[in-house]
Amino acid sequence: MRMRSLVVAAVAAAVLVACGDAGAQSQREVSAVPSSSSVAETEPSVSESVARCADVAQITTDVVSDGAQGNIDPVFHGVLLTYAGEHVDTFGGLWIDRDALGTVVLAFTDDPVAHLAALAQRRPSPDDVHAVEPPPEITDDRPIGEWGVAFDIAQVEHTEAELVDAIGPVIGAAQAVTVSPVSGGADLLRNRVSVDLPNPISPNDLVSITDAISELDGISSEMVCWSGQFVDEAPEPIQAGTPLDVIELPDSDGTYPADTLVTCDGLQFELGDLGKLTPAADVDAGLRSVLDDWLANPEGQYWPQDGWSLLYENFERASFIRIGDDGVSFIGAEMGANGWIWAGASAGGPCDVRLMLPDGLGAVEWELNPDVPTPDSSSTAISVLATERGCASGQDMGDRLLGPHVVETEDAVRIAFGVIPRPGSQDCQDNPAAPVVVELEAPLGEREIRDGLAIGPITSLLAN
């Protein structure tokens, strides 16, 4: 079943645009500084500049769903999409409010009460926009206000179309100041155009960006927010040529400490969590409802319905896991304002558990170079091909490649690499492999050549 796209907000709903990757509109007035040598240089007023997205309140709803709603029923969704299309001149966006346990929120620039009443009386129709293909059969033709699905209407200043139209000019203005890759999108939950500045900027830069945006026709700086860091806030970046030290050896019995941070198919957890899985049936009802409600929704019905366990839980986040012969699946939850809420799901094939790289480094996979003779017992060097796993617009790693980190023991030679990711938004395409010669301290002998970050298949690490 092919799903029609819906802007579902976790932190921000965004229509992304890349280069290289509620307030009234107004033009910011800039006072001229008198031309006099006796006048000290005026510090930029950051408080009058484009606001940080984190400081702009998200749109909220008081309508809280009775259960942790996940995705929208496709028939119900079709009614909403059709209604939004009929009011495109005032429509401000559609999303799922996860803090309200899945309440569907639509935004308009005009009277929300009238829209709420009108929507509640709408009945599904075969002529509605198809939220999925093929469209499902309509089995309930009652007005959607009688369906028991929580939804609400919010009033905003700008339409979704206005925000989307402003993305390109705003990003262009910001990039002209920073002279570096800038990305951005329509942050529907804040009713703003969001600008993501991957490189740290100075307060002067922010004022210049604000001035550049204020000069755009029909666009106010109050329509925009930014994410990023000031120069004095930026952590020390990892530099090209930094020595790599990421391989950890197991204990003498071949095991790793329980608090070892690992990753598997993108999910991060402690290795010891695999030894204390809790069957879903034994999990607190509030948290378990996230799993149950998601599996019961239209998309979740195609997932395995049994065999789930709680992998970990803390005060902020939790994750359910299912490990089967067909692969590993995860369903995430996070603590919202009204209890546990759905926080994403993923399913894949067999999952290999790996040591985590430090923050700021991307993953690199490597293999023996097929164009070079296979190493034998007398080899004192190993030729490999290293490939960046993340999106890098197909560019060579060059000096961004760190390593190899090599650890030699009596039975193995462990090899690992890392990469400094390219800044800004990147296209996802095949990345070129970099040939690397790994020098050994002693001839290879009978030792095994291993991936230094690999711990093993997740099925081999489960408690007996």
Image (cartoon, rainbow, N blue to C red):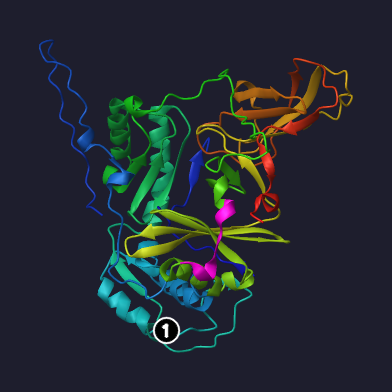
Residue 211: x, y in percent? 28, 34
Q: Is residue 242 above or below residue 26?
A: above
Q: Which residue does the image show at 70% across and 50% down from the upper left?
A: 460
- Which of the pair 184/283 is nearer the observer? 283
Residue 445 against residue 226 in the figure, above or below = above
The amino acid at mark 1 is: Trp
- Kindly identify which residue carries mark 1: 147
Of helix, strand and loop, which one carries label 1?
A: loop
Indicate left or right for 11 with 349 as reference: left
- Residue 147 in view: yes
- Label 1 environment density (alpha carbons within 10 Å; few <14, some 14–19, many ≥20): few
Image mark count = 1
Q: Is residue 154 above or below residue 157?
A: below
User: Which residue occupies the extreme front position in the image?
Assistant: 253
Residue at the spot 44% in from the left edge and 73% down from the top edge: 80
Q: Position of residue 357 (x, y in %)?
A: 57, 34
Residue 241 magenta-highlighted: no
Which span is picked out in magenta? 274-283
- In the image, 270: left or right of 341? right
Say which residue appears at 68% left-offset and 38% top-offset: 254
Residue 164, horizontal then vertical, whole percent: 42, 52
